Image: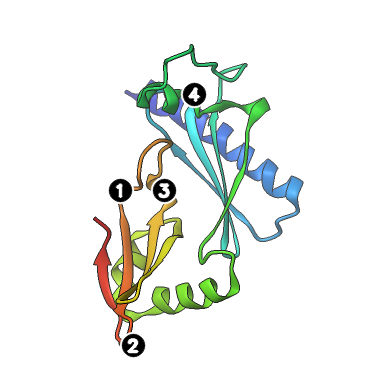
Amino acid sequence: MAAYVGFQATQHHRAMGLGQDYIYAQGLVGATAYTMPQPLSPFNWKVMVLYQDSYYAARVNLVRERPMILPAGESGFFANLRASYLPVTHMQWQQYTRFGKKPKDIVLAQAAWRHPAFAPFRRFAMFPVLYKIDRSQSKLCVWFSDLHFSLVGRVPPFRYGMCRGSSSTSWRLESMP
């Protein structure tokens, strides 16, 4: 057990170095790197960089030398998940924003995010991100998820938001079905 814990600590250190390298290369002064072990292999890691209200995320396999090429017809969940962890030399960083990119969405998302009823999700979420905004004639909902739990090919498991009726200014907490 001690050997495995030591092994994982070494992998964590390697993955953390990739996050630090990204921060340095992009000039993200004040950014913080995080790493999380991922399923299917002790070499699969998610590397996250938090900078202001943006996240930069990459999925990496620390020992693979080439990206996995899935055989024709093999597109199951586990095969796609396994292939989504790229070798260090092929890492792809994706940017996410906590409150979206459109100015009017940002204002709305920040209002929902700061509402006192949303405090439990704010405390729970490690890497919260705007999931989507639903607008209908009768209802407005601002939904958030947590990148910590996101996996390729899966809907995020924790999606919570603040909703209000079209004629109401009173927000209420809801979970997305």
Density class for disc 3 (Cα within 10 Å; few <14, some 14-19, many ≥20) is some
What residue is shown at x 39% (from left), y 28% (from top)?
5
Residue occupied by mark 1: 157
Badge 2 marks a residue whose secondary structure is: loop
Q: Is residue 174 above or below residue 56?
A: below
Q: Is residue 152 above or below residue 111?
A: above
Marks 2 and 3 in Cβ contact (< 8 Å) = no
Density class for disc 2 (Cα within 10 Å; few <14, some 14-19, many ≥20) is few
Q: Which amino acid type is shown beneath numbered disc 4? A: Ala
In the picture, the quarter occupied by the C terminus is bottom left
Give the side of residue 135 with respect to residue 89, left or right: left
Given this view, does label 2 or label 3 mark the residue nearer the observer? 2
Residue occupied by mark 4: 83
Residue occupied by mark 2: 169
Q: Which mark is residue 148?
A: 3
**In whole angstroms, how far apart are the C-alphas of marks 1 and 4?**
21 Å
Marks 3 and 4 in Cβ contact (< 8 Å) = no
What residue is shown at x 47% (from left), y 32% (from top)?
9
**In whole angstroms, how far apart are the C-alphas of marks 4 and 2?**
45 Å
Q: Which amino acid type is shown beneath numbered disc 2? A: Thr
Q: Is residue 100 above or below residue 92?
A: below
Q: Which of the 4 image quarters holds residue 62? A: top right
Density class for disc 1 (Cα within 10 Å; few <14, some 14-19, many ≥20) is few
